[in-house]
Image: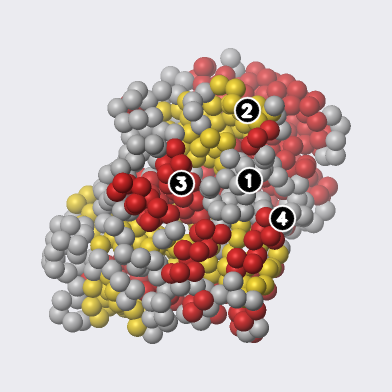
Amino acid sequence: MHVAALVKRSQRNMESTIDVFGGRCGVNRIKNNVTLTSQRLDDFAQTTRPRGRAFFARLIHTEKFALCGIACDRIKQRCLDGHPMSARFIIILVQIMRQSAGEVWERFGAMDYNHAWVPRQIGLSIQQPVMELRQCAGVRHGGKMREIGCFLLRAGSRRLRVFSQVVFSFPIPLLRLLLCSITIMLMNRCTLSSLLFLSMIFFANAADTTRDEYIILTWKKTKAQPSWNGVIEALIKKHRATVVVCDQDLRDSLPVLQKHHPRYVAVVGSHEQVGGRFINGFHQLMRQIDEDPYTDARWGVITGRKAEDAMKIVNEVKPLEIRHTVSGTRIATRMCEEAECFDELLPRGHSLKKANETEKEIPLDDADSIAELATAFSHPSTQLIITSGHATTRDWQPGFRYKNGSFHSRDGVIYGRDLQGKEHSVQQDTPKVYLPCGNCLMGLIDGADAMALAWMHSAGVRQMAGYVEPTWYGYMGWGLIDYFVEQPGRYTFAEAFLANQMALVHRLETVSNLTPMDRKGLLFDRDMVAFYGDPAWSATMAARSLPFSQILTQTEKSIVIEILPLEGEKSYEAVDTNGSQRGGRPFIAFLSKRINPSTFHIKDGADALLGDDFVLVPRPAAGSPARPIRVEWILR
């Protein structure tokens, strides 16, 4: 079977998909432009260049198109609830790519994949745009789409890059369409970036969202202060949010939350208003929006030592794709593009993983690692910081089992003090995520010199999650590693926080033989971890090879989740066991559109849970064979 034949089959698949939508607005225009791209693919096939076939083979060699299949699902899940035309276009796009995938795999599946340019082409034209598209549902305006389009076009040829700024500078769709067609015809090779490029043209029109998906909660006292009111107004503009102002108790907002059932809830307040007791109560409030016991929205607290620090969090719009991680404890570095690890258990323990290389052990010259840690934290490339070990609201001790220096906060600045008394400040404002997964009290704000505030003020932290009490069980802290770090690219940091919350509640609700200690630990962790930052801001790990694929398909009449092991019998096992309460967490995927679960019933598959905006599938017990899992719910 030649590529030309595959193109014709793709066109037939596209046409049958379009028939479902009839002659609605924009469909013919979509059809014509996808046909144009297909023609270009046909021309490409006629050149009979061997590397063209190898490109298709390489593109889908991972789990029969897993890379692009999952990418398509990401795009679809983020955009189905947006503009109707963009939703239809995405459905068509996914249909074409998926149907062609299996056929190409059968034809070229055994070919050699040693073409150095192919992984780069895939990585640039598929993975990175998907990371950028994660916020499309919340930020749908022409400027953002132009930014995404230009980002996408870096993967193309020199001519394509020249045309990128020109095409996206035209506000009239017809002119964009014409220029896009010319651009594609001038490409010196055709890749899937052209098809995705076409989608950007139409996404640029999908500017209006009408649903109140984002609600801001605040206090009258806060809104009355000009500096904090500026933060609120900036957040309203960023997300077209609804604001609920309460006198004293944010629980008064519950009727509004129940009415709107938002996807995101942000609390804006000064550091005096968001202490540990507030965090405990807010967790409970977020589980009361509907009848089920699960957290009902992605939420975050936007605060700072001063309003200016909170404004930095609000003004962060560009999604963060984490490529360089610095950790104060051992992690699975193979799930990171680049990582530097400092051992909290063994003195001088230190490893470094560079891009496209394996992890290398590089012992430090001395057990006192404060200077090296401060340097790593302050490096402009650092985007994720992970810490563990003894801590309070005023300090952190990197050496858990050996004598080391310590880190402190003073006047809003994080600094390290080595064993000789020398200080090493951490001052770098590049955006980053902070995960003190094994630290006590790092998430508690009990005054202006709290460590959490200093991380935001001097280290560039835009999102963080940390305990507001001394941690002893660890499910909520270490579980974020399971979902965020060890499933790179699958969840944003806010989604990973929510997924871990759901996993914890599900364990409490469904496991009947919990030990008294486990039940006590889960109940403790449930309300003891704070999330700071804008919950709609997208921070994800750079996409890496995953141990299993997870594809969710949602239509009006059915919901299907398919999980496929990619690493044999180890696919469903814990990637790493350092820490506490690691592994065994359920598979969780988020629906693009909220539903009423009672209107669906399970048709086939495992014992799974369908929530109003998520799907949860229990992970097979340790030692069980790693088999494919498929669960389907259909409308009653």
Q: Earlier in the sequence, mark 2 or mark 4?
A: 4
Asked which secondary structure carries label 2, the reply is strand
Across and down, in percent, residue 291 comes to 61, 47
Q: Earlier in the sequence, mark 1 or mark 4?
A: 1
506 versus 472 height, above or below: above
Q: Which mark is residue 505?
A: 3
Q: In which quarter of the image is residue 413?
A: bottom left
Number of marks drawn: 4
| Contact (Cβ within 8 Å) of mark 3 with mark 4 | no
Binning the other alpha carbons within 10 Å of mark 2 as few (below 14), some (14 to 19) or many (20 upward) gives some
Across and down, in percent, residue 495 comes to 51, 50
Give the residue drawn at x 25%, y 66%: 390
Amino acid type at circle 2 is: His
Residue tagged 4: 259
Binning the other alpha carbons within 10 Å of mark 3 as few (below 14), some (14 to 19) or many (20 upward) gives some
Residue tagged 1: 78
Binning the other alpha carbons within 10 Å of mark 4 as few (below 14), some (14 to 19) or many (20 upward) gives few
| Contact (Cβ within 8 Å) of mark 1 with mark 4 | no
Q: Which of the image's four quarters has the C terminus?
A: top right
Amino acid type at circle 1 is: Arg
Q: Earlier in the sequence, mark 3 or mark 2?
A: 3
What's the CA distance linking mark 3 and mark 4? 24 Å
Give the residue drawn at x 30%, y 27%: 623
210 versus 105 height, above or below: below
Amino acid type at circle 4 is: Lys
Image check: 338 left or right of 536? left
Across and down, in percent, residue 204 comes to 73, 52
Amino acid type at circle 3 is: Val
Residue tagged 2: 601
Q: Which of marks 2 and 1 is nearer the N terminus?
A: 1
Asked which secondary structure carries label 4, the reply is helix
